[in-house]
Image (spheres, rainbow, N blue to C red):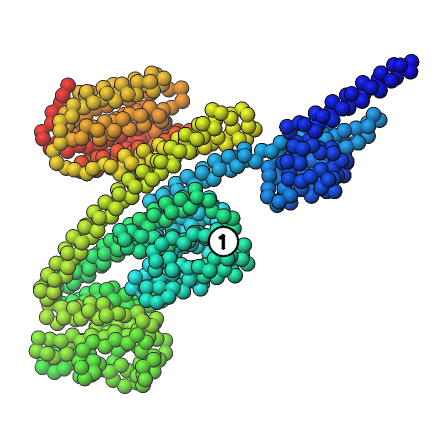
Amino acid sequence: MAAKSEEARLDLRASEERFGKAFAQAAVGMSLADTRGHFLQVNDAFCNILGFTREELTEIDSYAITHPEDRARYAAFSRQMLAGEINDYVIEKRCLRKDGTVVWVRKSVSLARHPEGEPSGIVTLTEDITVRKQAEDALVRKARLIALSADVGIALTRIGDLREALQSCVESVVKHVDAALARIWTLDAAADELELQASAGLYSDLNGAEGRIATGTSGLPASAIGMIARQRQPLLTNNAGGDPRIGDPEWARKEGIVAFAGYPLIVENRLVGVAATFARQPLDEDALHALEAIANSVAIGIERKKADQAREELLAREQAARHEAEILNHLGNLAFAELDLEKLVQAVTDAATELTTAQFGIFRYSAVADGNESNVLFAVSGVIDGVAARNAFNQCPPRGTAADLAASFGRSGGMVRYDDIRAVTGIGPRYDENAPLFAMPEGCVAVRSYLAAPVVSRSGEVIGGLFFGHENAGVFTEAHERIVGRVSTQAAIAIDNARLYKAAELARVQAQSASRDLERSNTDLERFALVASHDLQEPLRMVTSFSQLLARRYKGQLDERADEYLEFIQSGTKRMAALIEDLLSYSQIVHSTEKGAPVDCNALLDKVLESCRVTIEESGATITRDPLPTLDGDEGQISQLFHNLLTNALKYKRPDVRPEVHVSAQRTANEWLFSFRDNGIGIAQEYLEQIFVIFKRLHKKAEYPGTGIGLALCQRIIEGRAGRIWVESKPGFGSTFYFTWPDIGGASYSG
């Protein structure tokens, strides 16, 4: 019996020695702690992971080496296990090494028990997963940077207002780069200052201390932003709190700002603004490269939008000039055709009041009967507080004689304009009591802005006067003086043909200038699309290649979430690649109305059908056609047009209904009318025009995939040949897409 006990004791001792060796020499970190988390025993691998010695670890507990942000989650699992709710658990968390650095670990934790079943300690297997976590974080960062480039590109191309587009850009930077603050200034060249246009993150106010910044071209810059503008060089630092180049390092330390990246926005060696990003964590090379690319895109976007804005302003001035010319021309014709003086004066007053934006206008004029001067007559126009001005002045008609008219314009006898007549010395709030202004009784209009012009006959006699008023100050401008002067001239001597010709000539020149600006803007847009697509393709290919490589090597080895992230990245890069390709195709469409090479549409449709053979067979579609003509044009563009319309018809088919598509063409006077008719889902009336807008989608991507560029591309091709495209449709009954193609060279049916 004693021999057996000794043998058992020796076996137990040998087993314990083997376990001890395995524990000490294991490649994975192993530890034994009491139920309060204090380490009782650790192996070399565990010490190496954390950088502590065994002795040091026995003096601390597992919570002390856990990152503060992960302690609550770690403690919750431990409480559940000690309470008997779970037997063990696995957790990925961050630990603090002895040197203060962070290491990611994967811990498998289980509970050791006494023979009686009571917990005796906590056994943990610890694996260093820092490299894996860093790889995952790198993929996520690259995906976010790609999303940033996409968001900025969309904002600059789809948002018309410059300030709104730039605000969307800085919000995307804050979102995708985890920036604390992102801002964009544009150059006000006339004032030699940068004007803050967009701000997101810590501050959104555009009117603070940084609202306007001197560029430093005339002296020392007032801030880092001014220095960037002056030197036209980026300013990059991951030590914002200690970098003297930062305008206010104390502010950076207070707000926890670590990194700063500022870029000059330059187009063709011209400064157009500055972009700046502030972050509470260092910015790596990938982030800096992305921010630099964003700055280049924003610079081009600012220039293009300013050109668009200038063009719109020019067009508005042209429209205003045209409107003015139309009214003045009408008045000129009326002056010759209208024999009724009262009607003529009323028409002049109405037109002048409209052109000056006055609340009211009065035309005072004298009339002579039987050789004797009569009282001054008047006509009134305008609306005051929703009531016709004539009703107001019926209660207090303008006073004075014909002799007072000349006195109304002082010694100079010319135009009179007051920004605020109440501020003029000697004039009361309702005009002076004496001629030429006279008092306006209580209840009548209290005027601040005042404009008056004499109506002078060919003999130089003042025969009338135009008077305009507004209750707000500063309404009338020099431009209004010019308008009223012309109106008064027409009222006196009919129409000034030379000045009307000058106005028409000015309108023609402005139209030509606007056309050149539009052409230049379109060229810039095409250049931007080419550059943007090229710049996006290279990093996109890199992300695609590495994500595919990761998927091949590590799929199934990582957790399910990592595999899901890889699928998200691969799906996103495919969509981005398709979007870039479509954008590039869209930008490369060349407009031309000249005769091109002959294109046999029957043969071309055969090629398109062959390229879509798999889709046609899978859907069970039936494609029919009438004889098609031979056209003059670009074969590639016509092929793209046919392909997009055909695949569009196949894509939007009704469930459980085999697609049927019929292609036909008929000749009209000077063009060919094509139609692509299908039996698909159809389109509601309110969307018949919207579907040709670039990026416009009526369905979710999960329902019908695509980039939203196909029909916009068709429209661009057709309009580039001076044709038209439209659709007729009824939901549930299919759609028919029509387009016209000019018959330049006398095309005919080819089959």
Question: Residue 643: image x %, image y %?
Answer: 27, 26
Position of residue 33 measured from the top left corner of the image (x, y, whole percent) = 74, 35
Can residue 646 be seen here? Answer: yes
Between residues 215 and 333, which one lies in front from this camera angle? Answer: 215
Please say whether residue 430 is visible from this viewpoint: no
- Which quadrant would the N terminus be assigned to in this image? top right
Rendering quarter of residue 745: top left
Residue depicted at x 30% and y 41%: 531
* Vertical comparison of 219 with 174: above or below: below
Q: Nearer the viewer, residue 409 or 609?
A: 609
Secondary structure of the residue carrying tag 1 is loop
Q: Quadrant of residue 652?
A: top left
Residue type indicated by callout 1: Asn
Which residue, given by chain and number where applicable, does mark 1 sit on?
A: 239
Please indicate whether residue 81 sits to the left or right of residue 96 in the image: right
Residues 291 and 208: in front is 291
